[in-house]
């Protein structure tokens, strides 16, 4: 493995626009790419040892590292951001690699490269030092910027899509029978959804002329004081417009936490299951479920024909 | 090295994040569904307090695995305004935000161990532990 020693004067050239490294420096880096890559791989692997949250296998990590460093060098070669870099970063985003892997890797790369160049220099002086730093920065910085932009653009897009999806998870008021409606609450109730739920509830209660509203919280993972507060407010508002709220779907463990928290749900009736709540609702609206006579007769006929036969 | 993950609470949805992590940790320690619900609710209360009153802070988890007892420690740490009257706040029903109350007495009942240190304008630290029975 050849190791070239740097000359002197040529390093004082400034960098401009598309040319990152001065010709000699670039050659030097490319010719010693083996050493630089080896040093980089060592450092990155060493750093990884202190990263507990990494769930990526060592083989995958190493092979991605090799690909990564090749992509970095090809950008040096082509003197700019390459399609290989774009493809590489897109793949990593899709596979779910954290951005920190890339930025840490690049910072390490910057350091390793500068260390190596300076260690091979004949002379150490501020001018030379500044030039080397500037040149390597001009190589590495655009890559970092491009990667960060890709990642954050991707995140922002995902977040806005998810916000829309979350809004679509509305709280519908379902009119089951005349005067009885059900509102199933699903998922976490944050302040915004709570407002929406209250609006829907009141609007729907009036629109469907509901005498009884069943609020089903089977799908609510945790009832803390805020959620309970919203439910109580909703029930109170429903009561004010003359209807009754029945809370159903209280799981046993949720019942325990509600008791522990000291929340008083005594003001309005609660039932454990939707079925029981529904029966209560029917009661309150002067109805009940009975078995139809027709079906009974059919069964009797079947039974008697079996006996005869 | 002890693994003590923390969740930063800055946005309302961070409360859900803290709860998720807490639930996972609770499952790992071996808590049953009722205790998991208690732990998740306690985390929700503590995180919400940070969000509402301190603006930002963190919820930290620590698995306690000692010789004769195993449990999960949940800490709520913030550098917020602190609590002026601790006695008042530990009373059921007392609320400064129009809600049902800060839920601290509730958290105390949900968990097995509860300690709170607070300093006005400096911040608040709450440490709670749930033991595995």
Image (spheres, coloured by chain):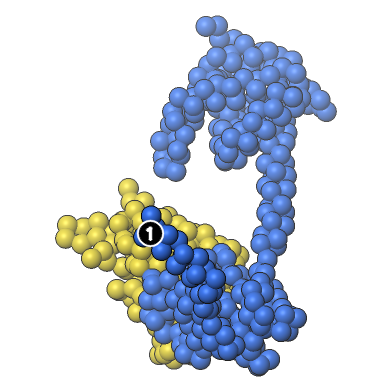
Apparent side of residue A251 relative to residue A181 in the rendered image (left or right): left
Q: Residues within 10 Å of mark 1 (few under 14, many from 20)?
A: few
Q: Is residue A63 visible?
A: yes
Position of A64 relative to B131 (above/below): above
Q: Residue furthest right?
A: A17
The chain that appears blue in the image is A
Q: Quadrant of the C terminus of chain A?
A: bottom left
Which corner quadrant of the image does residue A209 belong to? bottom right
Residue at numbered disc 1: A308
Which corner quadrant of the image does residue A214 belong to? bottom right
Q: Nearer the viewer, residue A20 or A229?
A: A229
Q: Is residue B89 visible?
A: no
Q: Position of residue B128 (x, y in %)?
A: 35, 71
Mark 1: which secondary structure? helix
Rendered hue of chain B is yellow
Q: Position of residue B69 (x, y in %)?
A: 20, 62
Q: Residue at x 63, y 36 (%)?
A: A94
């Amino acid at each position: 493995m050849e190791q070239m020693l740097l000359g002197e004067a040529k390093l004082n050239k400034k960098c401009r626009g598309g040319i990152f490294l001065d010709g000699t420096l670039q050659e030097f880096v490319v010719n010693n790419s083996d050493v630089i890559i080896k040093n980089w791989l060592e450092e990155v692997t060493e750093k990884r040892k202190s990263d507990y949250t990494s769930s990526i296998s060592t083989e995958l990590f190493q092979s991605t590292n090799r690909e990564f460093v090749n992509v970095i060098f090809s950008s040096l070669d082509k003197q700019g951001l390459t399609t290989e870099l774009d493809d590489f970063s897109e793949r990593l985003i899709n596979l779910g690699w954290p951005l920190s892997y890339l930025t840490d890797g690049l910072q390490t790369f910057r350091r390793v490269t500068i260390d190596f160049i300076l260690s091979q220099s004949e002379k150490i002086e501020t001018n030379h030092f500044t030039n080397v730093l500037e040149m390597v920065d001009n190589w590495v910085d655009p890559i970092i910027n491009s990667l960060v932009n890709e990642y954050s653009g991707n995140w922002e897009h995902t977040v806005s899509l998810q916000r829309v999806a979350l809004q679509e998870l509305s709280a519908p008021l379902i009119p089951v029978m005349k005067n009885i409606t059900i509102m199933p609450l699903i998922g976490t109730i944050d302040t915004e959804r709570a407002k929406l739920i209250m609006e829907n509830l009141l609007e729907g209660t009036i629109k469907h002329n509901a005498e009884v509203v069943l609020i089903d919280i089977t799908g609510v993972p945790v009832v803390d004081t805020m959620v309970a507060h919203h439910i109580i407010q909703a029930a109170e508002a429903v009561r004010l417009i003359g209807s009754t709220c029945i809370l159903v779907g209280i799981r046993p463990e949720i019942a325990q936490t509600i008791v522990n928290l000291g929340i008083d749900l005594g003001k309005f009736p609660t039932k454990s299951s939707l079925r029981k709540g529904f029966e209560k609702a029917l009661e309150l609206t002067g109805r009940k479920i009975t078995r139809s006579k027709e079906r009974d007769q059919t069964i009797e006929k079947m039974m008697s024909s079996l006996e005869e036969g | 090295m002890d693994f003590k993950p923390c969740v930063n609470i800055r946005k309302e949805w961070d409360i859900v994040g803290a709860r998720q992590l807490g639930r996972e940790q609770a499952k790992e320690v071996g808590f049953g569904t009722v205790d998991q619900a208690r732990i998740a609710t306690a985390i929700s209360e503590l995180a919400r307090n940070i969000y509402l009153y301190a603006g930002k802070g963190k919820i930290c988890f620590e698995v306690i695995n000692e010789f004769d007892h195993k449990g999960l420690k949940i800490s709520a740490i913030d550098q917020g305004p602190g609590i002026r009257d601790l006695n008042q706040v530990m009373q059921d029903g007392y609320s400064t935000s129009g809600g049902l109350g800060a839920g601290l007495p509730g958290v105390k009942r949900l968990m097995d161990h509860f300690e709170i240190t607070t300093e006005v304008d400096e911040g608040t630290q709450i440490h709670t532990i749930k033991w595995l029975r």
